[in-house]
Image (tube, rainbow, N blue to C red):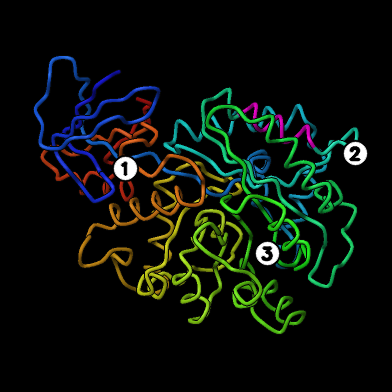
């Protein structure tokens, strides 16, 4: 058992000083505040918990920065998607493994303590009947770099909400319900320490109501459930045309959405949908850098905060792997939209960096099924050690790391 002394530490209930912790097998065994440094303790200056990453399409790291040119008269998410399909269909298992291992290594260095992999590139390039190998190489890559991973095999069956047939470019994503459940069963025997499984539906346009009910009924009722929900206005219009309701409203009418659901890209919400998410305890999975890169829209943060909604962040397409910059983009998008400053905070926690970090860690842990909820007994002992201006308060150091280039952080596994 090792012991550490944090001069300042961001615990789930806020900043504390002179924190002494013991760690065994990579997890916190004890935590005490207002302690004195002991001879055997390893001291650290100002620590925060590492961040859960709730949304990753790891293969897309290979195209980061390569789509920043106009490919259509008016580029948008849908024209970008064509470029992404081209990349996906060039990817084989060896290339996927290389990209995944590199990307997960970058996540660890950047301060992500775990990742949820939203995996839909199922079918092997050389053998379309093989829908297991790609999941196995993702598990292998994460295990080799020591990053806790929740693998979310994706059910992807249709090209549109009217059960439109998949295009040739989408065929490698396709699974039937029977194949999905078979894959899930096989993967249960492939997991290493620190690896979990979760249920995942690509979107309401890519699966049917019956398919979702079949999968949920067939699998344990304590697994996280992730779904893309309201990323693009065109997607919302298509769901309304098919079902007569907006995506979030329809989902809540048809399913018992609760705290194990992560609604990824819940970008376009009305007041009713905001209240539904907040009251259910589900988590809005926000990916600020990717959503900005794709021109998705701006999350309605003030209304969501007022409703008490839970949130988490993901690096999604991995145009940049940096949890601090994700939170900076989230806050800055609100400032630009509202023409105000310091939006993501409240009267109890007035520092934006602290408010955002605590909320994103709590929400991320909730829908990751991983012990990454912060500096607490039983949780994974992974931190970021921050250094900034001398004499600055701890909350100011975290603000400085997120919103300036005057503070630095180093990810450490204790």
Rendered residue at 63%/30% (across/down):
191
How many numbered marks, from 0 up? 3
Q: From the viewer's perspective, is 278 left or right of 149?
A: left
> Magenta span covers which residues?
132-141
255 or 119, which lies in front? 255
Image quarter (top left, top right, bottom left or bottom right) of the C terminus: top left
Residue 209: x and y in percent read: 75, 68
Is residue 140 within the magenta segment? yes
Query: Residues at badges 2 and 1 in contact (C-beta under 8 Å)?
Result: no
Q: From the viewer's perspective, is 385 left or right of 142?
A: left
Residues at marks 1 and 3, CA–CA distance in whole angstroms: 31 Å
Q: Quadrant of residue 408?
A: top left
- Main SS, magenta residues: helix
> Which residue corresponds to mark 3?
76
Rendered residue at 55%/59% (across/down):
261
The mark that comes first in sequence, 2 or 1, is: 2
126 or 371, which lies in front? 371
Neighbour tally class for label 2: few under 14, some 14-19, many 20 plus, Cα within 10 Å: few
Neighbour tally class for label 1: few under 14, some 14-19, many 20 plus, Cα within 10 Å: few
Residues at marks 2 and 1, CA–CA distance in whole angstroms: 49 Å
> Which residue corresponds to mark 1?
405
- Secondary structure under tag 3 reads loop
């Amino acid at each position: 058992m090792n012991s550490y002394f944090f001069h300042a530490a961001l615990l789930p209930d806020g900043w504390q000083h002179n924190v002494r912790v013991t760690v065994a097998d990579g997890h916190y065994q004890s935590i005490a505040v207002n302690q004195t440094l002991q001879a055997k303790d390893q001291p650290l200056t100002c620590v925060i918990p590492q961040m859960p990453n709730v949304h990753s399409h790891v293969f897309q790291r290979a195209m980061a920065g390569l789509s920043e040119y106009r490919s259509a008269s008016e580029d948008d998410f849908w024209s970008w998607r064509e470029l992404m399909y081209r990349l996906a269909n060039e990817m084989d298992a060896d290339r996927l493994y290389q990209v995944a291992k590199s990307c997960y290594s970058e996540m660890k260095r950047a301060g992500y303590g775990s990742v949820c992999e939203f995996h839909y590139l199922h079918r092997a390039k050389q053998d379309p009947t093989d829908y297991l190998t790609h999941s196995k190489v993702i598990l292998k890559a994460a295990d080799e770099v020591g990053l806790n991973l929740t693998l979310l095999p994706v059910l992807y069956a249709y090209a549109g909400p009217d059960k439109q047939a998949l295009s040739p470019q989408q065929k490698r994503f396709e699974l039937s319900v029977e194949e999905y459940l078979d894959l899930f069963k096989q993967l249960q025997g492939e997991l290493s320490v620190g690896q979990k499984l979760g249920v995942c539906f690509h979107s309401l346009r890519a699966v049917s109501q019956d398919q979702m009910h079949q999968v949920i009924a067939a699998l344990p009722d304590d697994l996280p459930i992730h779904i893309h929900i309201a990323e693009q206005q065109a997607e919302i219009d298509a769901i309304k045309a098919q079902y007569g309701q907006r995506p979030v409203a329809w989902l809540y009418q048809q399913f018992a959405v609760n705290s194990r659901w992560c609604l990824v890209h819940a970008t376009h919400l009305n007041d009713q949908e905001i209240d539904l998410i907040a009251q259910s305890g589900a988590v809005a999975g926000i990916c600020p850098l990717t959503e900005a890169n794709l021109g998705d829209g701006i999350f309605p943060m003030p209304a969501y905060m007022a409703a008490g909604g839970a949130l988490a962040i993901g690096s999604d397409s991995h145009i940049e792997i940096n949890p601090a910059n994700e939170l900076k983009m989230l806050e800055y998008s609100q400032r630009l939209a509202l023409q105000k400053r310091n939006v993501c905070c409240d009267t109890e926690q007035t520092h934006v960096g602290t408010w955002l970090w605590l909320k994103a860690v709590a929400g991320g842990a909730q829908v990751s099924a991983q012990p990454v909820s912060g500096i607490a007994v039983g949780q994974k002992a992974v931190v970021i050690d921050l250094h900034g201006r001398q004499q600055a308060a701890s909350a100011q150091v975290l603000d400085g790391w997120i919103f300036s280039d005057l503070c630095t952080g180093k990810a450490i596994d204790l």
